[in-house]
Image (cartoon, rainbow, N blue to C red):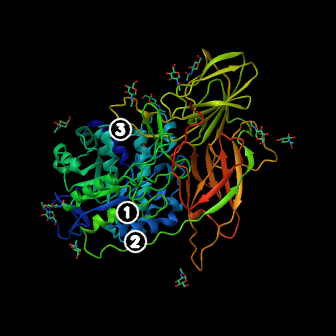
Amino acid sequence: MHTHTLQLLSWLFAVASSTNTTPAPTSTTTAAPAAFTYNSTSFLLHGEPYTIIGGQMDPQRVPYQYWRDRLSKARAMGLNTIFTYVYWNLLEPQQGDWMLDDPQNDIAEFYKISQEEGLHVVLRPGPYICGEREWGGFPYWLSTITNLTVRTYNEGYLNYSKIYLEKLASKLAPQQVTQGGPLLMVQVENEYGSYGSNHDYTSTLRDILRQIYDVPLYTNDGTENFTLSGGSVPGVLAEIDGGPTYGFPARDEYITDPSQLGPLLDGEYYTLAPDNWGANVPHQTTVGNPSYVDGFVSDINFVLNASNSISLYMFHGGTNFGLSNGAIWQNYTKVYTTSYDYGAPLDESGRTTDLYFALRNVIQQYVANGSIPEPPANLPLASILKIKLSPMASLFDLGEPTKSSTWPVTMEELGQAYGLTLYEHKVEEDLEGLLLPGDRARDRVLVYVNGKKIGAVDSTYIYPQNLTLTVSSGDKLQLLVENLGRVDYYSPPSHTYNSLLDPYKGILTNVTIGDTILSGWDMYSLPLEKLPIPAENITKEDSPIYYSGYFHVQGRKGNDTRHLDTFINIPNGVKGIVWVNGFMLGRYWIIGPQQSMYLPGTVLKPGVMNEIVVLELEPTNSTMIAQGQAERIWGNFPDPDYS
Ligand SMILES: *[C@@H]1O[C@H](CO)[C@@H](O)[C@H](O)[C@H]1NC(C)=O
Ligand SMILES: *[C@@H]1O[C@H](CO)[C@@H](O)[C@H](O)[C@H]1NC(C)=O
Ligand SMILES: *[C@@H]1O[C@H](CO)[C@@H](O)[C@H](O)[C@H]1NC(C)=O
Ligand SMILES: *[C@@H]1O[C@H](CO)[C@@H](O)[C@H](O)[C@H]1NC(C)=O
Ligand SMILES: *[C@@H]1O[C@H](CO)[C@@H](O)[C@H](O)[C@H]1NC(C)=O
Ligand SMILES: *[C@@H]1O[C@H](CO)[C@@H](O)[C@H](O)[C@H]1NC(C)=O
Ligand SMILES: *[C@@H]1O[C@H](CO)[C@@H](O)[C@H](O)[C@H]1NC(C)=O
Ligand SMILES: *[C@@H]1O[C@H](CO)[C@@H](O)[C@H](O)[C@H]1NC(C)=O
Ligand SMILES: *[C@@H]1O[C@H](CO)[C@@H](O)[C@H](O)[C@H]1NC(C)=O
Ligand SMILES: *[C@@H]1O[C@H](CO)[C@@H](O)[C@H](O)[C@H]1NC(C)=O
Ligand SMILES: *[C@@H]1O[C@H](CO)[C@@H](O)[C@H](O)[C@H]1NC(C)=O
Ligand SMILES: *[C@@H]1O[C@H](CO)[C@@H](O)[C@H](O)[C@H]1NC(C)=O
C-alpha cells in the first residue's frame, strides 16, 4: 500500500461509523456456514454449492410497475440470480439532490420483489457502470468540479463516490443475504482493467464497499492479461466477461494472487448487443440468425456442465427512457438508441421470445425437473389508430438568454445536463466560407441563418458535413446543438484519446466561418425538462416545433388495472423527442434502426384523454401524426441531412 493511500484512507474513513474489516472469503471452516461465500471451485450458499445461473436486468431501465412481471419471467427461464447495475446520475441528478424516494430508483424494492419471485441478486454499483448509459452512469455535474478526475485515485472523485455508495448502501445493506435478503455479492468498479490499472483507486473502492457490505466483493474484466491485471484487486474475487471457453482459462492463467481466485463466473455473457443510430446499422437480433443461438446454447452448456457460473448480459435490456442513453467514442460519436432491446431473451417490452425458450431448454437440463415455473403468458399489445398532431409551440420562442459572452461556453458551464443548447450570433461583417461550429461540436448541430435551416453538422459521422455559408452583416446565425448522450466507453490503448475525461457537450471551441472567429454569443439552455405552454400562434420558419395530440385507450376487463403497451411511431418525423402524459419516452430518428418507441401501459390513463407531445427538430411540410402499433418496426432510411 502506498503512503498516499494511507493518507487518503485516513480521511475517507474518519467519518465512517463502522470499522468492520471483513476479510475476503476463505476456505477456513467456521461454526455456522457463512450465508454466502466460496471456496476455490464453488460458490456456497448456507454451506451448499450454488451455481449462479444469472441474467442482467437494470431496475432503472424498466418501468417499476413491471419489475415483478419481468422477474417472474426470469425465474421461469430458469435463472436463479439477477445482476443489476445502478445509475448514479438518476439517483443524484444535481449535486446533493438525492432522488432515492423516486419509485423508479427504489432498488431495495426491486430486490424484495426478486426475493419473493425466488431470485437472488448481485449489485453492480459502479460508480462507473458503462452499460451504454450517459457517461457510464456518472452524473454530469462531476465534470463541473475543479480538479476532479473520474475513475482514478482522485480525492474529489473518491469523496463523491463514497457519499453515493454509502447513500445507496443505506437502502441496500439490509437486503444482503447475511441479513435475510437476496443480495449475494457486490462488484467493485466495472471492467476497470479496460481503462486503467491504478490499484490505489480500486483498493480504495474495495475498502469503502467492505465498510458497508459484508457479502463477498468481486471484479469483472475482459479476458486479456492487461484487463485482468489492471482490473483485479487484492482480496477481491476476479471474474471475467465475454466468451467463457477462452475467458475461464484466461482468468486462471493471468490471475495468480490466491486472494483473487475462486469459482469461475462469466459475469457478462453477451446474449447479443445494443443498437446504435445509423442509416446503415441494422437492429441486432437472433431472428433469422440461428447460428447466434447455437453459439449461446453451446457456451451455456460449456459453463453449466462444469458447474461454473454465468450471467446473461442482457436477460432483459429495457429502455433508455428520456435522454439517458450513452455513446461510444470511435473517432466519432457512435450513439446508442433509446431502445435497449439488445436482442435479449426478454424483448424491450418484456415479452418472451424464441431465444427465451431456446435458453430455457438449455438451463432445464441442469436443474431439477419441475423446479422451473411455467412462463407467464405475454399480454397482448394495443393498437392506437392515427393520432392527429397539431402545432403547439415553437422551440425558438425564446425568452432571455441563459448567458451572453464573447466566446461560446459548454452546456455544463450553463449548468445544463441534457437536451439542446441554442447558440445565437449577430453577424457583424459579410463573410463567406466553411462553417466550423468549433472542433467537433457535441454532438449534432442544426444551422440556421435568419431562421432558415441551412444544414446539419453532425459528429456522429467521422467526416461531418462541410457547410459553406455566405452571410451578411446583420444576419442572425443560430446553432442548435443536441447532446446525443455522453460517451460511456472507448477502448484504450487502441484509442489514445480519453473521451471519458472530456464529457462536455455543446460548443467547446471557437466558431469560425472561413478564417474569421465569431465573437459575441447569446446562449439558451433548452434542457426539455418541462413541456411548453401552448402558444397562441406559432412562428413557422424552420424552428423545431412541438406538436400535440390526444387519444383514448380502453381499460381492461374486470378488475385488471394493467393497461396495454404499444409502440409509437411518427411516420412523417425526421428527428425528435416524444412525451406521453408528460413522460419522456425518448428520441426517434428516421435513420433507424429504431423506428418505433416502446410506450409502456403504465404511462397510459384509461377513460380520460391521453396527451402525446412530439418535438420535431426538423419539421417538414407534411401533416404530423403519431400511431400506436401492436407490432414494432425496425428499419433504416438514408439520413436526409447527409449526402
Ligand atoms: C468446494 O465446495 C464444493 C461444494 O461443497 C466441494 O465439492 C469442493 O470439494 C470444495 N472444494 C474445496 C477445495 O474445498
Ligand atoms: C486544483 O489543483 C491545483 C493544483 O494541485 C491547486 O493549486 C488548486 O488549489 C486546486 N483547486 C481547487 C479548487 O481545489
Ligand atoms: C474530501 O472529503 C474530506 C472529508 O470530508 C474533506 O476534508 C476534503 O476537503 C474533501 N476533498 C475534496 C477535494 O473534496
Ligand atoms: C501478465 O502481465 C503481467 C504484468 O504486465 C506480467 O507480469 C505477467 O507475466 C503477464 N502474464 C502472462 C501469463 O503473460
Ligand atoms: C459434460 O461434461 C462431461 C465430462 O465431465 C462430458 O463427457 C460431456 O460431454 C459434457 N456435456 C456437454 C453437453 O458438454
Ligand atoms: C482514430 O484516429 C487515430 C489518429 O488519427 C488513428 O490512429 C486511429 O486508427 C483511429 N481509430 C479509428 C478506430 O478509426
Ligand atoms: C429431467 O427429466 C428427463 C426425462 O425424465 C431426464 O432425461 C433428465 O435427466 C431430467 N433432468 C434432470 C436435471 O434431472
Ligand atoms: C469535409 O472536408 C474534409 C476536408 O476537405 C474532408 O476530409 C471530408 O471528407 C469532408 N466531409 C464530407 C462529408 O464530405
Ligand atoms: C477563441 O478565440 C479567442 C481570440 O482568438 C481566444 O482568446 C480564445 O482563447 C479562443 N477560445 C478557445 C476556446 O479557443
Ligand atoms: C402572433 O403572436 C405574436 C406574439 O407572440 C403577436 O405579436 C402577433 O400579432 C401574433 N400574430 C397573429 C397573426 O395572431
Ligand atoms: C379480480 O377479480 C377476480 C374475479 O373476477 C378475483 O378472482 C380476483 O381475486 C380479483 N383480483 C383482485 C386483485 O382483486
Ligand atoms: C407546404 O404545403 C403547402 C400546401 O400543400 C404548399 O402550398 C407549400 O408550397 C408547401 N411548402 C413547402 C416549403 O413545400
Choose between 222 and 464: the one closer to the eye.
464
Residue type at the position of mark 2? Pro
Residue type at the position of mark 3? Tyr
- Which mark is nearer the camera, 2 or 3? 2
- Label 2 residue near ligand 7, CB within 8 Å: no
Q: Is residue 445 above or below residue 325?
A: above
- Residue sitting at the far front: 288
Q: Residues within 10 Å of mark 1 (few under 14, many from 20)?
A: many
- Whether residue 236 appears in this view of the structure is no
Q: Earlier in the sequence, mark 1 or mark 3?
A: 3
Q: Quadrant of residue 470?
A: top right
Q: Which residue appears at 45% of the width and 72% of the height?
A: 377
Q: Which mark is residue 153?
A: 3
- Whether residue 310 appears in this view of the structure is yes
Query: Secondary structure under badge 2?
Result: loop
Label 2 – label 1 distance at C-alpha: 10 Å
Q: Earlier in the sequence, mark 2 or mark 1?
A: 1
Which residue does the numbered mark 2 point to in the structure image?
A: 375
Q: Quadrant of ligand 12?
A: top right
Label 2 – label 3 distance at C-alpha: 46 Å
Query: Secondary structure under badge 3?
Result: loop
Which residue does the numbered mark 1 point to in the structure image?
A: 356
Q: Are marks 2 and 1 in contact (CB under 8 Å)?
A: yes
Q: Earlier in the sequence, mark 2 or mark 3?
A: 3
Q: Residues within 10 Å of mark 2 (few under 14, many from 20)?
A: some
The percent position of residue 608, horizontal first and vertical second, equals 70, 67
Q: Which residue appears at 31% of the width and 49% of the height?
A: 206
Choose between 603 and 119: the one closer to the eye.
603
